[in-house]
Amino acid sequence: MKNNKILIAVVFILIAVAVIIYNKSNSVKQGTIDNMEGAKSDFAIKDTASITKIFITDAKGKQVTLTRGDDEWIVDGKYVARPDNMRLLMKTFSRIDVRSPVPKASFNTVIKQIATSATKVEIYQGENEPNKVYYIGGATQDHQGTYMVLETEGVKSSVPFIMYIPGNYGYLTTRFFTEPAQWRDAVVFRYLPAEIKSIEVNHFEDEEASFIINKNNGKFELSAIGSSEILKVDTAILNEYVNRYQKIYYEMIDIESSQEKIDSTIASPPFMSIEVKDAKGASNKIILYHMPNFRQIINSQTEEEFEYDVDRMYGYLNNELFTYVQFATFDNITITKKDFTN
């Protein structure tokens, strides 16, 4: 009997402790925040389909505008946005949550940091004015939270909060970059065969390997560049090659090289170029340049360093975008004329 009383007492104590812990853990969202005058903590946007525009600007003045189109997001009214980046952004808006208020010891420092170096994110939901504005500071010491201030209806929250994505590790600042080129879809060529008028592939280090494919009366024909002679090829191989242009992407934009280095590379002799023209008269062209063997990769057969990088090369897309591209991707379309005629 005595043991039962002790057991019951222990159970009640455990329940009481659990209640205290629960109330403490929920004080951030229920008690503490509600009692802060002028505090705004409703960062999340559950209906991300209602978001029509996002404007991001940083303390240095760099900015980008993302606008929802009929089927895709558009960067600065010019380029299709990367779908994976947009999915991550929508996930961030829908799942962002308060981890805790900012501790008193670091409150003034955080306020000053946000005031001087925050990234500002305006989120529009069909109105002329933003429905919500995030002011995004740096990361917490453990890099598992991000200091942020919310603004709604033109009024900022009186206090900042530490924000996070439940179940995710890492801080959120890096998701809101302001370089427009980094938001662009990494597509180089994305054509259905029916959309292609011609494909011209130049091998500048071996002119005999170059070729052009033209569509004539709905059929693709191959010839040497500068020649009107139609070469005899396996039609199945030719059609399969044209099909490869449905998904060709660059790896990433080169944001590491100086402009001087980029200009020097562009002025140097390329080793290849590929240009696709579509039925509407538009074209996409990428010029390929060797990348130095920065990683000092050794040729296992000669035990000497390769002259150039064996995995990547530079790609200059449409005379405006300097990128890294992978041989693993481009090997599919950088074949030679002999690959068709043999």
Image (cartoon, rainbow, N blue to C red):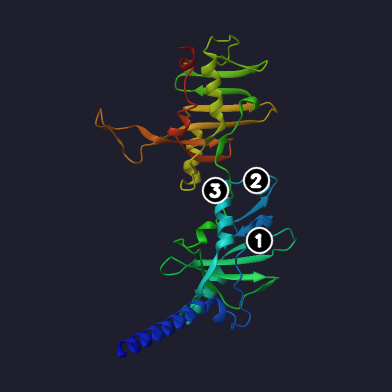
Residue 316 visible at all? yes
Above or below for 203 versus 84 = above
Residue 97: x and y, percent? 54, 67
Query: Which one is in front, 219 or 4?
Result: 4
Query: Which one is in front, 287 or 149?
Result: 149
Label 1 sits on residue: 123
Rounded to the nearest angstrom, the CA distance separating label 1 from label 3 is 19 Å
Q: Quadrant of the N terminus?
A: bottom left
Of pointers 2 and 3, the one earlier in the residue sequence: 2
- Dot 3, crowdedness within 10 Å: few (<14), some or many (≥20)? few
Which numbered circle lies on residue 72? 2
The secondary structure type at the circle numbered 2 is loop
The secondary structure type at the circle numbered 1 is strand
Which numbered circle lies on residue 84? 3
How many badges with numbers are in the image?
3
Above or below for 262 versus 18 = above
Rounded to the nearest angstrom, the CA distance separating label 2 from label 3 is 12 Å
Residue 181 visible at all? no
